[in-house]
Image: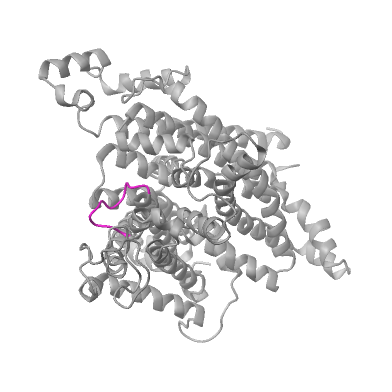
Amino acid sequence: MPQSLTPWFLVIQRLGIALLTLVIVSFAVFFATELLPGDVAEILLGQAATPEAVAGLREAMGLNEPALNRFIGWLVGLLGGDLGTSYVNKMEVVELISGRLGNSLKLAGVTTLISVPVALALGIGAAMWRGSLFDRIVSVLTISVISVPEFMVATLAVLIFAVWLGWLPALSYGADVSSLSAMLKAYAMPVITLAFVVSAQMIRMTRAAVIETINTPYVEMALLKGASRKRMVLGHALPNALGPIANAVALSLSYLVGGVIIVETIFNYPGVAKLMVDAVSTRDLPLIQSCAMIFCVSYLSLITLADMIAILSNPRLRR
Amino acid sequence: MMAEATTTTAKDAPKRKGPGYRFNWVGRIGLAIILFWAVVAVVGPSLAPHPPGEIVDWDYFGPVTKDFWMGTDYLGRDIFSRILMGARYTVGIALAAVTLACTLGVILGMVAAVAGGWFDMILSRLLDAFNGIPSLLFGLVVVAAVGSSIPVLIFTLTAIYMPGSYRFARALAVNVNTMDFVTVARARGESTPYLILREIFPNILGPVLADLGLRFVFIVLVLSGLSFLGLGVQPPNADWGALVRENIEGLSLGAPAVIFPSIAIASLTISVNMFIDNLPTKIRDRSE
């Protein structure tokens, strides 16, 4: 094979692994929710669970078929956009999710727009002035944010911005989007919290990536030739650190998936995560499965994207 | 991924000189706080000034007073006593899960590294797939399926963090496995269990212990997250995450009932991080 094709071969291989992973993950999600609990028909019927009714409902829902058949049927339905019907309110899962998904994506999008530039600036800055007071403050702050649970970051944000400063409403999601300021206020808290969690990761990884390039001989050479620190970092180290940095950004964004679950719950934000947490408390299995798959797919695509960037930006594979 | 990020910066930490295993003061503070919480988890509940489950104050979300050192919660129960009791759940569950996860992961990792071949390949692929599930989500799905109890929590957390531990131990063991002294031992005709236990295990122990500490932090975080969502330790018992959840209504009042459990979680996780980051390089990077 020609040398120049090697990275693309690796990328395709990575995609294949991601697909295989997705199948295993969907298998795990399906069987964790479908096989472990007690009889679904009995749960659904509740008080009215006479043996005949249970048998009838099992037949109607196709529960008597072998599990593998049901899994394949579920997977095919999933691919075709048929997510099944909610157990609790008999609504199509697609309908329940579609509106919520937009909300969650909006939250994630705004967070990304804010946190990426801030995190890159802070991370590169900390690497540039490594060991300085600025670097130490950034390091202590990021490690503190990483070491505490997401809900604590949210709690602190509420304490500071709502309780002490009184700028923003505390724990309610205002459905009031009539004016720009009202909308900003409604989004502010969840976005601030998520941005903190995601940026902390991103700053640490960016700093590590830039420092790694600074430690290479050619950057040291630039320094020895008399280039200023700024020129050394921005002109020589940064272009070569772009790949690892992009990798870091994609990886950190995958923390959105976990963060969003907590943040939507604490701020009562009507997104997919809130829907899923509510579905867990009502044991609404089709809804849980679909939400879980949405999260797994987004998480997996971000991780795969990060890996592919890492492969493509590796100069040893680029000839 | 978080583990990788943290280890990278761990390497940035200044190296200390001197004989033996010496900790600098940051590491010592970390260790002291860890030991403090460990002692509290064992003897804490008997030191509690009030019974943790009993309503002792007519006021809810009470302030810090002489009787109630950390205020009272939404029912008027003493927060200080509940935190002492909660330490047992948080530290106990996390410790059990991390021990199980790392023991299983390290054993499987070493076996995979030494055995190689199809065993290694299938196991690695399968466990990598588990890494494709966000940890909190995995917990949510399992709890939705089987309900929440302490053994379920321990096994779920084990299942979430075992693949990472496997990966870490396998990568280390693969390196050690190619070293001369292992080849020599193999040429002597030593059995595979001997190779794993006597030649490889002692040489990856240091980094594995550091990894165990980091994993402990992640487990505490996910456990608190689950409890915060109401899916972890169930009432009337409460770990620290559940204490924050119970009293979240008091947040807009700035009640100490929300703040102190949060501080308890943060003090534990941050001090473990501080301790691991400042471990003597001798222990941490023994394989390098």
Residue B231 inside the magenta-drawn segment = yes
Q: Main secondary structure of the magenta part?
A: loop
Q: In the image, is A45 to the left or to the right of B192?
A: left
Q: In the image, is A187 to the left or to the right of B98?
A: right
- B262 over A277 or under it: above or below: below
* Of residues B9 and A14, the one drawn nearer to the viewer in this rendering: B9
User: Residue A1 lies in what quarter of the image?
Assistant: top right
First to last magenta residue range:
B229-239
Could you tell me residue B64's position as x and y percent?
Answer: 37, 72
Q: Residue at point 71% right, 50% down?
A: A117
Could you tell me residue A63's position as x and y percent?
Answer: 24, 19
Could you tell me residue B60's position as x and y percent?
Answer: 32, 61
Q: Residue at point 78% right, 51% down?
A: A239
- A41 over B194 or under it: above or below: above
Single out the residue that lies furthest toward the left: A51
Single out the residue that lies furthest toward the bottom: B19
User: Residue B133 lies in what quarter of the image?
Assistant: top left
Q: How many marks?
A: 0
Image quadrant containing the C terminus of chain A: top right
Colouring convention used in this rendered image of the protein: one colour
Residue B284 inside the magenta-drawn segment = no
Q: In the image, is A29 to the left or to the right of A95?
A: left
Residue A227 shows in this picture: yes
Q: Residue at point 43% right, 61% down?
A: B183
* Of residues A26 and B266, the one drawn nearer to the viewer in this rendering: B266
- B85 over A240 or under it: above or below: below
